[in-house]
Image (cartoon, coloured by chain):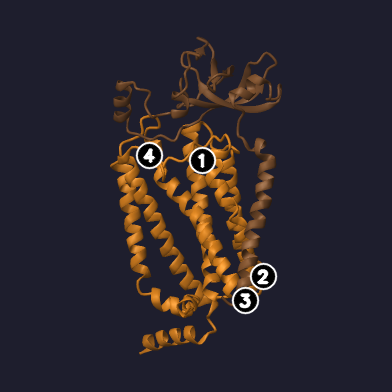
Chain colours: A orange, B brown
Amino acid sequence: MNWQWFYQLGSPKWFYQKTHYWQHWLGAFALMMLVVGAIWGLAFTPMDYKQGNSFRIIYVHVPASAVSLAGFYIMALAGAAGLIWRVKLQYTVMSVAAPIGAILTFLSLVTGAIWGKPTWGTYWQWDARITFTTVQFFLYLGIIALQQAYRNQNTADRACAMLALVGTVNIPIIYKSVDWWYTLHQPATLKLTEKSSIAPEMAYPLIWMILAYYICYVWLLISHTNAASLRRERKSSWVQALFSDRNATKVT
Amino acid sequence: MHPLRKQRLITVIFIVIASSALVGLVLYALSENLNHFYPPTKIVSGEAPVGKTIRAGGCVVPGSVKRDGKTLVVRFDLTGGTARFSVDFEGILPDLFGEGEAAVVIGQLESDGVFKATEVLAKHDENYMPPEVDDALNADNDGSEHQRTCEALDYAS
């Protein structure tokens, strides 16, 4: 089998050249989708029969939670690819996925607490889902801290990849916690295999927002990967050439 | 695949499987403690400790909510279908608390089987719909989809 395409995927230079032209367009598209989805969900969706307007936080809470979970798998898979093939780009993807995931998890926890007060009557309960989501937040923070903890980049990357792999255990637990135990948090509303327990006119903006969050995530991942690649490879000839070219054009 | 990489792949898979097994066993051992609340059957059967601060959850039996006219004292029954127990609470109930809805109460179980709650939380279900749809469903009164867990119960038994 020809593995050349695969090794190209591991090259920061190749990735930068392929993506840096259109990453800003992807960003503009992602932000547009977010704005459209937010207006749709906040202004043009009927309110809930029981919760009134406070249900609208679902349009931030559910996408943030879903992408923070998926993001952990992306981070761990990138880490695994880095461990197995010793490729630079995958480690870079892993290291930039951690802060993005941490912010999304934080957003999920905060919006959940804001919603919990009017709905449940409390900001915080140590129920299984909330607790394990907090664990995920600390795992993300741990990976960010571990990146800084070693002077040698390669050692830091390997340690982070290990932690990310072990941390994936938490993902199915968060996902299934509402079915496995009695929790204050309600079970899933959007279901893949059976009828969703949300009215269609409320579900469409939600699906739109989840999609918007995913696109936004991909944009952040690509642009941060490129930025981190430039920093990590600052001594390499292709980055040097890139910047000497730019300086040259500026001067002339 | 290069043998060295294959070996690393096996190591990675081993890390994931070993840590999953470890965490799985821990969770299995702790499973009971990870429940956020006791269901009514455990409260009634005496499996829940008496005189210790615990959480209990169930569906509020319709017609069981009795308020004291002068104070904030309220008494209601929680059920899981067959088992049923009374809750005493003094304070303001959350907005989404209601008959035929799920609730979680925090407090102590008295020896006479009454639960003295210090806090009452409304447990929201996974159903979302506009008010008009709910009205339409209630007009049919066919035991609609909403609040399946609590609505499906036969409270008469």
Q: Residue A166: x percent and y percent? A: 63, 58
Label 2 and label 4 in one chain: yes
**Mark 2 or mark 4, which is nearer to you?**
4
Q: Quadrant of residue B83?
A: top right
Label 4 and label 1 in one chain: yes
- Mark 4: secondary structure: loop
| Residue assigned mark 2 | A150
Q: Is residue A221 above or below residue B136?
A: below
Q: Residue A143: x percent and y percent? A: 60, 61
**Number of residues whose C-alpha sits closer than 10 Å to that of mark 2, classed few (under 14), some (14–19) or many (20 or more):** few
Q: Residue A4: x percent and y percent? A: 47, 80
- Mark 2: secondary structure: loop
Report in which chain the residue with disc 3 lies: B
Which quadrant would the C terminus of chain A be assigned to in this image?
Answer: bottom left
Q: Are marks 4 and 3 in contact (CB under 8 Å)?
A: no
- Residue at 53 percent of width and 21 percent of height: B81
**Which residue is farthest top?**
B69
**Number of residues whose C-alpha sits closer than 10 Å to that of mark 4, classed few (under 14), some (14–19) or many (20 or more):** few
Q: Is residue A128 above or below residue B138?
A: below
| Amino acid type, residue under disc 1 in the picture | Ala
Q: Which mark is residue A195?
A: 4
Say whether residue A220 is visible: yes
| Residue assigned mark 1 | A113
Measured in 3D between alpha carbons, the distance from the residue under mark 4 to the one under mark 1, in whole angstroms, is 27 Å
| Amino acid type, residue under disc 3 in the picture | Pro
- Residue at 42 percent of width and 43 percent of height: A191
